Image: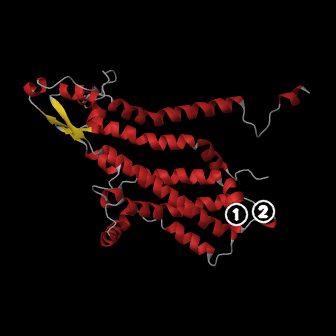
Amino acid sequence: MSSANSAHSVVEPSLTSKRVAGAIVILYALITLIPLAWIFLTSIKSPPDSISYPPKIVFTPTLEGYCNLLTTRTRQTPEYISSLPAPTGTCDEVTRKRNMVIAGPSNFLPRFVNSLVIAFGSTFLAVFLGTLAAYGFSRFRVPLADDLLFFILSTRMMPPIAVAIPIFLMYRQLGLSDTALGMILLYTAVNVSLAVWLLKGFIDEIPREYEEAAMIDGYTRLQAFRKVVLPQATTGIAATAIFCLIFAWNEYAFAALLTSGEAQTAPPFIPTIIGEGGQDWPAVAAGTTIFLIPILVFTILLRKQLLRGITFGAVRK
């Protein structure tokens, strides 16, 4: 009887296994967070502290990097600066300590807004079109469906640089260069293949009987899709949206080639931040920190759906 009570399930992990797995996960999380923590610490350093060797761990925090990121500055004589009225804000005060004055806002915020518009716009279109295409492949008899699905997937097999020049020439002829619409269409075309493949797997897991019962009750095919299938596929749509957004948010090659001013996004703009004597590393780190916030917030808000979406269909009844 005692041996029967001491036996444990072969499915349930032991306490030691749980502790070892937990320790490995915590260690991995700490290692992956070190670069992010270093970027944030660099953003609140002064320019001399950011390039000091050996690197400074203990330093006096300053908002100079964020001020340099969000403003443009000009150097003035000490006599001119002393003749100005009292500083009106933190950035004004920090800038005057460097014998400079604020000349106006920088181009970071417009580039950041471009990233928001292009990334979220292309994500919405890719998920919308991918959902419709995945539903069609899942529910209808499409001629040469396997060949079409492989063709859709093959669009992601080539490296972006292989099609960069043809796309550049095409966009120049169509007038889509350096436009938000052109970038949204391009990112949508790249992401829609991923959306189709991911969402088809989720929709395949939804029993057809749900839709058939709804149509027997008087629903049309479109109403059954909207009121029955979409609520069941929410986790898959959320997971797909996160992956599409991550690509569109971080994409650099096409953004650097096809945009230069009006539609330029943050990734190609941040490395061009130049300070006195070279790269302004605190401003670059500040821009990177701000750039991480939207994608981090979006992922946190949809984290439950993402975890469900990744494990969806792993356990079948």
User: Is disc 2 surrounded by few (<14), some (14 to 19) or many (20+) residues within 10 Å?
Assistant: some
Q: Is residue 246 left or right of residue 172?
A: right
User: Which residue is depicted at the point 72% across and 32% down?
Assistant: 14
Of the two numbered discs 2 and 1 on the same chain, state the one appearing first in sequence: 2
Q: In the rendered image, which residue does mark 1 sit on?
A: 223
Q: Which mark is residue 307?
A: none
User: Is disc 1 surrounded by few (<14), some (14 to 19) or many (20+) residues within 10 Å?
Assistant: some
- Which is more toward the observer, 17 or 250? 250
Point out residue 178 in the picture as x, y percentages from the top left corner.
31, 60
- Which is more toward the observer, 257 or 153? 257
- Which is more toward the observer, 158 or 235? 235
Residue 241 visible in the snapshot: yes
Point out residue 57 in the picture as x, y percentages from the top left corner.
34, 24
Label 2 secondary element: helix
Q: Residue furthest bottom?
A: 143
Q: Residue furthest right?
A: 1
User: Which residue is depicted at the point 29% across and 38% down?
Assistant: 70
Q: In the rendered image, which residue does mark 2 sit on?
A: 214
Q: Are marks 2 and 1 in contact (CB under 8 Å)?
A: yes
Residue 156 visible in the snapshot: no
User: Which residue is depicted at the point 92% across and 27% down?
Assistant: 1
Q: Examine the image and state in which quarter residue 209 appears.
A: bottom right
17 relative to 221, above or below: above
User: Which residue is depicted at the point 34% across and 40% down?
Assistant: 287
